[in-house]
Image (cartoon, rainbow, N blue to C red):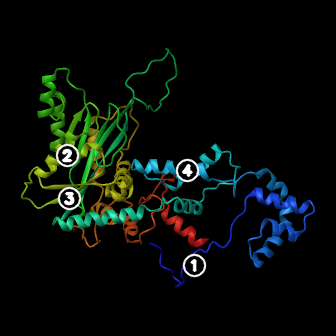
Amino acid sequence: MRRTSIKGTKHVPLTHKYSTYSYAKKLAVINHFRDGGHIDATLSLFFSEVNAMRRESLRKSIYPSIDREDGITPLFGTPISPTLYGPRTRSLVEWVNNLRGEGLPVSSTMLHVQALTVSRQFDVPEGKVTASHVWQRRFLRQQNLAAAAEATAEFSQEVRTYMEANDISRLLNADQTAVFFELLPKRTISNRGTKTVWVKCGSREQQRATAMYYTRRSPIPPQSSCYMVLADASGIKFPLFLVFHTKQSTNPDMQQINVKGRHGFGVKVWNEVTELQDTLNVQIYGNGTAWWNSELTCQFLRSHFGARTPESPPWLLLLDSFSGHWTDAVEACAHKHNIHLMRIPPYLTWQAQPANVAWIKPRLTAQLANRPTGPFVLAAPKRRDVVEWMCAAWGRVSARTTICGFLKCGYADGTTELSATDQVHVNDDEQLVRAVQAPKDTGLLDQAFGEIADSMDVVDHDLQLTEHAV
């Protein structure tokens, strides 16, 4: 949707009256004229199809071109301009489509860096490709990559139509994501007398957590955890569903008992997990990968919707295309509790999933703001610390933020009123509200809200400002 013109002027459609000539043709014109060809004969030979006005314009441009011959000769054999074209452009288009196919947003900085990288690979002269905001806007339009907004609008309309057809009054979204916490090594080996140097350690010496936020991330190796979040369009947030890495029992019978009665944990760890669940109002499960699967999706549904029956009012839950959410067992479990499931297309998760659009960044911001302060202590975080950090971060994401996610995706009409008890706000709530109230853009680049770092600057708004400035 185009921005309304302030001065009442209309956009003038392109007529394509002029064409750009290759450097090879320009060089041939210069050589023919220099070798004794008359200017009229040169124009008749190379530009016989143009009208009189265009012919006169070309006559005036030939003389200055002779002075620029030294700059044109090295470019002989190149197309219209020594920039990105043909296979060069196709490689950039494939890169964008691959990222979007995985549900990853493509920011302005990412596209800028990739365009410069491709230009260097094809030996494009330095400075010929700037990958500016205006160039990015034109590139996305020419390659039909700017249609995400229309696809998102169609999907949101499909969701609303489905809700009306099935008399569904409540819409929910869930997304899972990985959480990374640095695990300091427990032992170092060095020669006696070596000076001690404190360093941060990564690679395998890293503890991670996966929480069900419902955002898919890359599979997580051992020593990790994840969590999943759930909220509805009215701003109500549900307790977190956490998954931690735990060592599997070597006794198959004991492992079955752990899975059925202790959420996958052993006897000693289960005592700590039970206390955390009761204290922080969360559900904690464990497996050997600390990542999601269909059984965990079923447990997730039973945990939040176990009290519902087939006669309960129908609800609609939006999930991404992660394979663990779309098995027969999961669909049967959802049907048992009268929960309708709808799959978000993988190429639209960055723009059609409220958790990706608005929830994740405020949670990360709240988690960083809630870091413990004090003197540095060389100690790895305990399981209790990790759970408390994640619960505190999710608790600080306000109802206004969750509602804005549904509004921006087009699933709500903006008439939902916030609860009077909602007193928790994060710094970028106001930016979220302004983003929701702003007109829908053309979806040229992937979107994010609030304050964003230089490495994640998604600049639809900046592109529009640049277009008007030009």
**First of labels 3, 2 by sequence position:** 2
Q: Nearer the viewer, mark 4 or mark 3?
A: 4
Return the residue at label 3: 316
**First of labels 4, 1 by sequence position:** 1
Indicate which disc residue 280 carries: 2
Q: Are marks 4 and 2 in contact (CB under 8 Å)?
A: no
Q: Amino acid at mark 4?
A: Arg
Q: Amino acid at mark 2?
A: Leu
Q: Nearer the viewer, residue 455 or 394?
A: 455
Residue 67 visible in this rendered orientation of the protein: no
Q: Nearer the viewer, mark 2 or mark 1?
A: 1
Element carrying mark 2: helix
Element carrying mark 4: helix
Residue occupying the point 43% across, 59% down: 447
Above or below, comparing residue 290 to residue 359 in the picture: above
How far is disc 2 from disc 1 in space, using C-alphas? 60 Å
How far is disc 4 from disc 1 in space, using C-alphas? 30 Å
The crowd level at tag 2 (other Cα within 10 Å; few <14, some 14-19, many 20+) is: some
Return the residue at label 4: 90
The quadrant of the image that shows the N terminus is bottom left
Above or below, comparing residue 453 to residue 227 in the picture: below
How far is disc 4 from disc 2 in space, using C-alphas? 51 Å
Return the residue at label 1: 12
